[in-house]
Amino acid sequence: MTLKQMRYTIAVAKYKSFNEAAKNLYVSQPSLTSAIHNLEEELNFEIFRRTRSGVELTDQGLEYLFRIQAIVEQVDDLEDDYKEEKNSLLYFSVSCQHYNFPVDIMLRILKEININYRFSILETKTKEVIEQVSDNVSEIGILYFSDRNKSVFLRELKKFGLSFHYLSTQSPSIYISKNHPLATKQKIYMKDLEPYPFVTFYQGEDSSSLFVEEIVDFSKKGQIIYIQDKATGWNILKHTDGYSIGSGILDTDWTKDIITIPLVDCDQMQIGWIQKNQTKLSEIADYFLRLVKLELQTHLRI
């Protein structure tokens, strides 16, 4: 016994005709008739008696109708309640590599809106950003590629049915403590970094080195510290001579002891956003991306 069969029964009883019930339910009459017949076999009694003037309920059919009407009404009320709740909420989710600026943009939007919402900002591994957008966990993803990993990156997007939309080109910077031995330099070369430990986000054992969030492959470097969240990374940078590499944007509210210095002899970062092919952005996603672009224009050299 299914909810569909219950609805069919109620409609046939209302219109006293299989044909009229099918028309009003926008289903074929054979499909409706078959569903009612299967239901009668399951219940082991006739619900309807066929007459010359149409159909009428049997005594058992009338009792059955009385009971299922209450069930269907409760289901309809429940669906209406959840539809109203869902329609009154603003939904948006973005997945991203470990950047500060998407969080800053989300905070700005939260200060502007005064309706109920369900927002998610998911900082995660590069490959998971791609998978989450593909699986509709997030509407969009924020990440970058370089000349070194461009072909692998675009091939992975194609495999998952995603497209990349360019936002900005940026020369990377290093993040270090203001007390770091390199802190007085105006620019940094790769050779300057050789004595110091590299702090990088863990991408998983099965992930290619081409999916690292840093612009340079340090997989053969002697001293590497793997982290999974920004707070841990900032603490390590603050209290050691370690360094990390990124866009150069800092959240000064909680990285007061960290500085950035341009890294001049490596590839540039192509920062952008991804979405599923042939999908239309929601208004909130479009607004979020416009604010991201403004943020990048303010802070990055584009």
Image: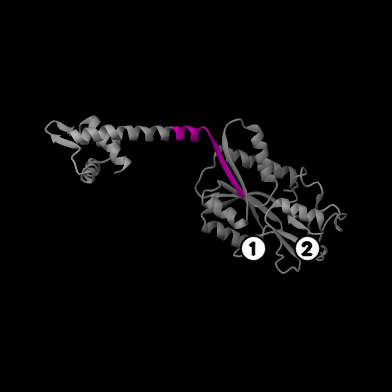
Specify the segment rendered in magenta: 81-95
- Can you say which quadrant of the picture contains the N terminus? top left
Q: Is residue 159 left or right of residue 255?
A: left
Q: How is the image coloured?
A: one colour
Magenta span includes 86: yes
Callout 1 amino acid: Leu
* Helix, strand or loop status at disc 2: loop
* Helix, strand or loop status at disc 1: helix
What residue is rendered at 31% in x and 40% in y? 4
Residue 210 numbered mark, or none:
1
Image height of 182 relative to 121, above or below: below
Q: Which residue corresponds to mark 2? A: 197
Image height of 123 relative to 70, above or below: below
What residue is rendered at 19% in x and 41% in y? 45
Magenta span includes 153: no
Q: Is residue 175 visible?
A: no
Rendering coords of residue 26 (x, y %) = 29, 37
Q: Is residue 48 visible?
A: yes
Q: Residues within 10 Å of mark 1 (few under 14, many from 20)?
A: some
Q: Is residue 132 left or right of residue 171?
A: left
Q: Earlier in the sequence, mark 2 or mark 1?
A: 2
Rendering coords of residue 160 (x, y %) = 52, 56
Callout 2 amino acid: Pro
